[in-house]
Image (tube, grey):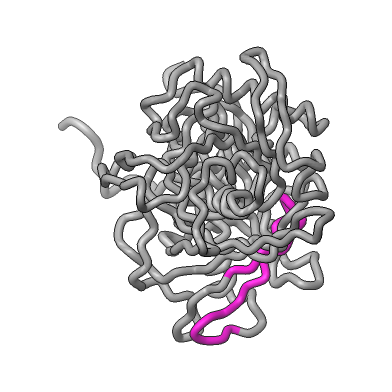
Amino acid sequence: MHGSDTGSLTPVVPSGQPLPFVLMRGGTSKAVFLRGSDLPRDVDERDATILSLFGSPDPRQIDGLGGADLLTSKLAIIDPPTHPEADIDYTFAQVSISEAVVDYDINCGNISAAVGAYAVDEGLVVSVTEPITVVRIHNTNTDRILLAHVPTHGGRAAVDGSYVVHGVPGSGAPIGLDFGATAGGITGSLFPTGNVLDELVTPFGSVPVSIVDLANLTVFFAARDVGMVGTEGPSDMTDDMFARVAAIKAAAAEALGIDGGGLIPVPAMVAAPASYTAFASGTRIDAEDVDLLARVVGGRPPVLHKAYPGTLAACTGAAALISGTTVHRVARQRDSDEVRIGHTSGVMPVSARVASDGQGWSVESAVYNRTARRIAEGTTFVRSSTGTQRDGE
């Protein structure tokens, strides 16, 4: 008889270190949630654990929880608050798919929505109020407080609702995120160069840019300056476009005196309103429905985002209202605080308020809505060995 008597088999014990986790979607992203106390304190050991958890580096992340996409290879580390005005500490990590690298120099605004819902459901907020609970999140990446307005029902974060996020199937309960108090989180200033507009010299020529530090440190420039029109999807990018974007990012980092090998400053291309077809859904977006177009390149290796980062949406919305910036130059000006950003997967509205005292600009609020949902919770098993041997070798 071929095979074995399965009834006599000894139960298999999972190999690896058990680690409790929660998997959540926030906006157009998805992240693994861990408690900081469950991770090694040593930085190198922590990153090795995270890479093993995600199955990186590997283009399919087949041996871990990673989703083999920039938007789904993300981690949220939750700790007790170290800031007196916060309910929780939240550290965001972008886990590379192709390299053994974990980046901590940016925040994710989509996952920030899930952080608010997670905090409510995990009992990390002292007082849950209905219909809205405000969660004060201390983002350690930028050392700034952001506010998540989480809809609640029965003491838990509400999931069902009619709010639609372009790039996410179905609808959900809207979580309002306000990044108005996050200016200068990386550099100490909303405009770290002291100017709303700078000229950067690159191997491809001189390029006007606006470097803005709100939610995430971002360098904005016209899409045409890198050979784009602003309506591109991921498959439309060329090697020359990527090279030009990388050159501007490097020049901006040099101007700021920071390491250009990280993910910041995040390069964002902007253009005047135009009609286009949204990536994946095939939905037609009319020029009249947006106030500007924006595309973002990021990750390792760099790719065009399939949606729009929430942090950059807050930054883009504020910059669109500040006269003289590259964003303001292309944006349709309306008698409204709302800025409608046309991105790869659709339209993302941001409500922003800015002010000028004659000496400089400040941001009073930068608010957008996302939805979030707890997808899974349980125990994952991290390999005891992080060696490079592959099956069959």
- The residue nearer to you, when weighing 10 against 75, is 75
Residue drawn at 77 percent across, 72 percent down: 85
**Residue furthest left in the image:** 1
Q: Is residue 132 magenta?
A: yes
Residue 14 location in percent, x, y?
48, 47
- The residue nearer to you, when weighing 188 against 38, is 188
Residue 131 in the image: above or below residue 381: below
Residue 97 location in percent, x, y?
52, 32
State the quadrant of the N terminus.
Answer: top left
Residue 225 shows in this picture: yes
Q: Find residue 94 and report its image quarter.
A: top right
Residue drawn at 18 percent across, 30 percent down: 2
Residue 232 location in percent, x, y?
40, 32
Residue 356 location in percent, x, y?
75, 59
- The residue nearer to you, when weighing 134 against 37, is 134
Residue drawn at 56 percent across, 34 percent down: 298
Residue drawn at 66 percent across, 52 percent down: 215
Q: Is residue 141 magenta?
A: yes
Residue 250 in the image: above or below residue 351: above
Residue 247 located left or right of residue 301? right
Give the extent of the magenta segment: 128-148
